[in-house]
Amino acid sequence: MRVPQHPTLVRRMLQSRLKGLTARGPVLTASLVRIAKHCGRTGCRCQKGQKHVGNYLTFKVDGKTRTVYVPLDLVEEVRAWIAEGRRLKGLMRESSVLATALVASHVAERKRKAGRS
């Protein structure tokens, strides 16, 4: 993202990002993973190489990775929720960059005005 020099343009871009921060549905900050496992039962198909596959959400809680099973009928919805979380995270990152640029342009403007006196 290219950040303009002029504070008015920075403010306009920042307002645009802030308007987009409204969630369009549920939000998840997690990852969806497919895990293939052996079940441990003797004679099961997974013992011959065809493992049981499941979908899981992974996320951090207090620095530890947690995993939650996601039923097959919820996988597409969960993907949409994760995409929404990533969209909002990106907008927050851009908003932070623009706010920092706004502060920097304000400081530069004050220095420029102080030099005129």
Image: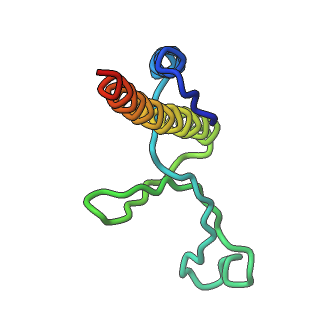
Q: Quadrant of the C terminus?
A: top left
Q: Nearer the viewer, residue 114 or 92?
A: 114
In the depicted structure, whether residue 1 falls above or below residue 47: above
Q: Position of residue 16 (x, y in %)?
A: 53, 16
- Residue drawn at x 56%, y 52% as measured from the top left: 32
Q: Nearer the viewer, residue 107 or 19?
A: 107
Q: Position of residue 93 (x, y in %)?
A: 47, 39
Q: Position of residue 19 (x, y in %)?
A: 48, 14
Image check: 48 left or right of 94?
Answer: right
> Extreme left residue here?
62
Image check: 64 left or right of 86?
Answer: left
- Residue drawn at x 47%, y 15% as measured from the top left: 15
Q: Nearer the viewer, residue 104 or 60?
A: 104
Quadrant in which residue 33 is drawn: bottom right
Q: Quadrant of the N terminus?
A: top right
- Residue drawn at x 56%, y 80% as measured from the top left: 41
Residue 23 visible, this orientation: no
